Structures are given as C-alpha cells and as structure tokens.
Amino acid sequence: MISDKSSVDLVAPVTERDHVRGALEAPVVLVEYGDYECFHCGRAYWVIKRLREELGDELAFVFRNFPVPELHPRAESVARALEAASPQDHFWDMHDWFYEHQHELEGLDLVQHAQAIGLDVGRWKRDLQDPEYRERVREDVETGRGSGVTGTPTFFINGVQYPGSYDFESMLAAIRRATT
C-alpha cells in the first residue's frame, strides 16, 4: 500500500547503518520500508530483484523494517530474526529466503529458516535475544513513520517518497527520471 498523501522526504538518510545492496554512491538509491509477511511486499521483492538486474551498479537498494503487527502478528519477530542474522553477514540471504518462500511462512519455524541459509544457529539464537535487534526494528519503524510511511511496501527514490505503482515498468521509469 502506498500512502495517498503528498510526497514526503525520507527523514533518516541512508548510511552505513542500513542494509544496502550496491554502493551508496550509486546514482539512484531505492529505499523500501517493508514487512516480511506482507503479500504486496512479497510481490515487490520480485520487481526489486528485476530492477537490480536491469540497473546493476546504477542502483543501490536499501531495506528497512516496517512490521505491521496488527495485520501480521509474526512480522516483528521475523524482522528481528533477520537483524540477528546480520552479524554473520547473512541478512540478505535470509531476506531473500523469506521473500522467496513467503508462501511457506504459515507455521513459521525461524530455526528451520536460519538453518536453510547456513547460519550458526546457536550464535543466531543468542543474538536474537540481544535487545539491539528489537531496537533496530523500532528505529526503522520510527524513521518510516517520520517519513510518512503508513503501510507496506513504501518506497523512496533518492530520498523522495515514490507514490506510484510498484510494478517493474512504473518503477523503472521513475528511477530513470531520477537519474536525468
């Protein structure tokens, strides 16, 4: 869902703190606020993947957590699970695995997912208890709210909220406009 409000700027600029695919110096930085249980985010995952393939080094992609527990009761625990995969450099592996297997999230077994991507599960379980990861998710949600995010997925292109459809053609056109 994209907010129908006027476009809002991203209040928290992208930094090394973020999960970034690509170089922060890329001509276009695409930020997504997403929820791992959100069907629409699952559809958008495939669009982003295709955009990354099409644009290569021209695009940096950033994912920020925006769990919507009122609609998706496990979303926050899943977001924390992915954050806890970060110290083992498996955030993106787990991110991809969750979206590529989103249809299998019923009866969610986070340990099974962690094993599937090759995490040291003992370490991951310890990291999962660290309040740092709950705080990380909370900070993402707060920066999203401050940037006008009301639902997922919500995108920002070079710091400006993208109000259009999240199909490949529409997003590619908006990204190309951002580079001219």
Image (cartoon, rainbow, N blue to C red):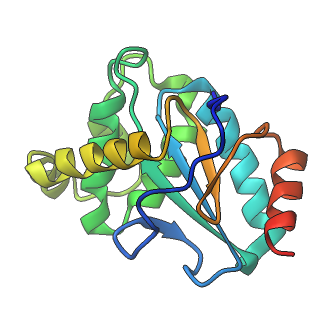
- Apparent side of residue 150 relative to residue 125 in the rendered image (left or right): right
Residue at position x 43%, y 44% from top? 144
Residue at position x 47%, y 47% from top? 147
> Which percent across, then down, holds residue 153?
58, 37
> Which percent across, then down, holds residue 69?
34, 21
- Is residue 114 among what the camera can see? no
148 versus 180 height, above or below: above
- Is residue 84 among what the camera can see? yes
Residue at position x 89%, y 56% from top? 173
Q: Nearer the viewer, residue 107 or 23?
A: 23
> Which percent across, then down, holds residue 137?
28, 45
- Apparent side of residue 126 relative to residue 28 in the rendered image (left or right): left
Total label count?
0
Q: In which quarter of the image is the C terminus?
A: bottom right
> Which percent across, then down, holds residue 47?
75, 47
Q: Which of 156 and 75 is in front in this view?
A: 156
Q: Which residue lies furthest to the front in this view?
A: 6
Q: Which of 81 and 161 is in front in this view?
A: 161
Residue at position x 56%, y 49% from top? 32
Q: Residue furthest bottom?
A: 25
15 versus 7 height, above or below: below
- Apparent side of residue 129 relative to residue 101 in the rendered image (left or right): left
6 versus 131 height, above or below: above
Q: Quadrant of the N terminus?
A: top right
- Apparent side of residue 123 relative to residue 70 in the rendered image (left or right): left
